[in-house]
Image (cartoon, rainbow, N blue to C red):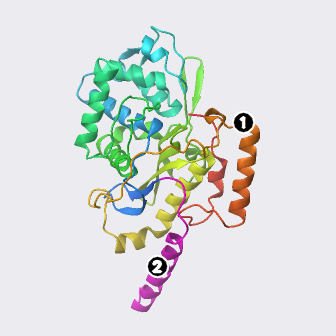
Amino acid sequence: MPARCTRLLQAMLLSIAAGLMTLPAMAGPALLFDVSNGRILYAEDLDHQWHPASLTKIMTAYVVFEAVKKGEISLDSRIKCSELAHVQPPSKVGLNVGAEMSVQKGLEALVIKSANDVAVMLAEAVGGSHEGFVERMNATAKRLGMTRTKFVNANGLPEPEQVSTARDLGLLATAVVRDFPEYANLWSMIETRVGKSHLRTHNGLLNNYAGADGMKTGFICDSGYNVVASATRDGHKLVAVVLGEVTSNDRALRAASLLEHGFLTYGWKAMFNSETIVSRPIEADAKGPITIRESVISWVCGKSQKAMAKMRKQRAEKMASGKKVQVPRAKQVKAAQQTNQSKE
C-alpha cells in the first residue's frame, strides 16, 4: 500500500477511535483484550473490585478441569447432592439429597444453567468439602496473578468478601482458554438436558452475536448483570468483561459493542498499543466493592413490575435523547438486543 494511503488509513482509524473514547463513561468496570497475547483494547476501572456473582463459576470449572487433568476425578465420576447443595437458592437444577450426576453433566449444568447446587456438588467432590474447595480456588487465583480477588463460595451467591476485578477475571479467562482448550465447546453450549430438565443458557450473545463462543454470565442484586464474553473472527479471539449493568439486555449490548469495537479497530490497536492485562500497572485509585442494588431493574431486587416499566421507559428516553450511551459504541449491534432475559 502507498505511504500516502497508509497515512490516510491511520488517520481515519485514529479519528474513529478518538470519537469512541470520548463518549461518556457509564455503568461498571469493563475490559476488552486479545486473549492470545493479553493486549488491552479497552479498559475502564479494570482494578475496581466488584462482586463477581456467577462469574465465580469460571474458577469453579477451572479447578475441576485441573482435578480431572491430575486424575483426581474423571468426567464419568458420579457426584452426589448433599444437604448443603440441596439448600442452595436458584438458579439451580433442584436435585434431591442423595441424587447423583456425572462430572461432565455437572460442568454443563454449572456453565449453562449457572446451577448453584451443582457448584457445591462439584466443590465437595473435588475438594472433599466446600470449604476445602474454596481454599483451592483462592490458591489458584493467587497462582494466576489475580491479586484483588477473594472467593468465599463456589457459586457466587452474595457474600460481602467475595470480590474480583475486570482484570482478574480477564486473567482467569485467559487461563481457561490457554490451559484447557479441550473444554472450548462447553463454554459455547446453548442447551443441555439433566434428566427430564431442559437447561438453556443465560448468555444471549451465543445466539445473537457473530463469532460468539463463550463464556459465562452472572447476576446478583448488589453487582448487577455481569458477563465474561468471548468471540472469534478471522483467527482473533477477543474477550470482553462487563460488570455492573442494570439489565441483562444492557449487559449483552455493552459486551457486543465492546467486541465490535475490538474487531473494527484491531489493526490500529495492535499497531499503537502494547499494554497487556499483565504489564499494565495496578490503578492507584482502584476502589473496593460497591452495591448498585437500587439501580438494578429486576423484581428479584425489589423492583415492582410497574417500577421496572417506568425505569425502562426513562432509560429509553434518555438514550433516545443522547444523554446516555453505551461505551464504547462502535455501532448499534441489533442482534444483541434480542438477548435472553432469564434470571441467573
Residue at screen point 28% across, 23% down? 132
Q: Horizontal and vertical percent for residue 87? A: 49, 16
Range drawn in magenta = 1-28
Query: What secondary structure characterizes most of the magenta part?
Result: helix
Given residues 293 and 154, the one toward you in this image is 293
Residue at screen point 60% across, 49% down? 208
Does residue 308 lie above or below 85 as drawn?
A: below
Where's the C terminus, which quadrant? top right
Q: Residues within 10 Å of mark 1 (few under 14, many from 20)?
A: few
Q: Amino acid at mark 2?
A: Leu
Check residue 304 in the rendering and tell me which mark sits there, or answer none.
1
Residue at screen point 43% across, 92% down? 4
Q: Is residue 12 magenta?
A: yes
Given residues 46 and 204, the one toward you in this image is 46
- Asked whether residue 81 is in view, the answer is no
The residue identified by callout 2 is 14
